[in-house]
Image (cartoon, rainbow, N blue to C red):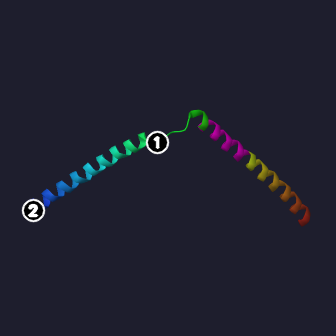
Amino acid sequence: MAEISKKASSESSVNIVDRGVRFLREVKLEAQKITWAARKQVLMSSLMVIFLSLFIGAYLGLLDMIYNFIISLLVK
């Protein structure tokens, strides 16, 4: 009885390893099918996101300072 459970245990661990290896191979094959963006396109998109984030942050910061000033005048 103990031999059967040891054998089943070792088979299931090998099965898990085989399944993991097969999964990683399939992931590699799928990654090769991906059409990656050109380097220039990625760079331009990243710069646009950074610039837009800085612009919106500055705009909201300016609005915050203006509203803070107005409210401080009203509270006095």
Magenta part of the protein: which range? 42-54
Farthest residue, direction top: 40
> Residue 62, position in %: x, y?
81, 51
Q: Residue at x 35, y 46 (%)?
A: 26
Residue indicated by mark 2 = 2
Name the residue type under label 2. Answer: Ala
Q: Residue at x 42, y 39 (%)?
A: 32
Can you tell which mark lies on residue 61? Answer: none
Q: Residue at x 49, y 40 (%)?
A: 35
Q: CA distance from mark 2 to mark 1?
A: 49 Å
Residue indicated by mark 1 = 34
- Give the side of residue 44 with respect to residue 3, left or right: right
For the residue pair 75 and 30, the one nearer the viewer reads as 30
Other residues around mark 2 within 10 Å, as few (<14) / some (14–19) / many (≥20): few
Magenta residue check for 57: no
Q: Is residue 73 visible?
A: yes
Which SS class for mark 1? loop
Nearer-N-terminus badge (2/1): 2
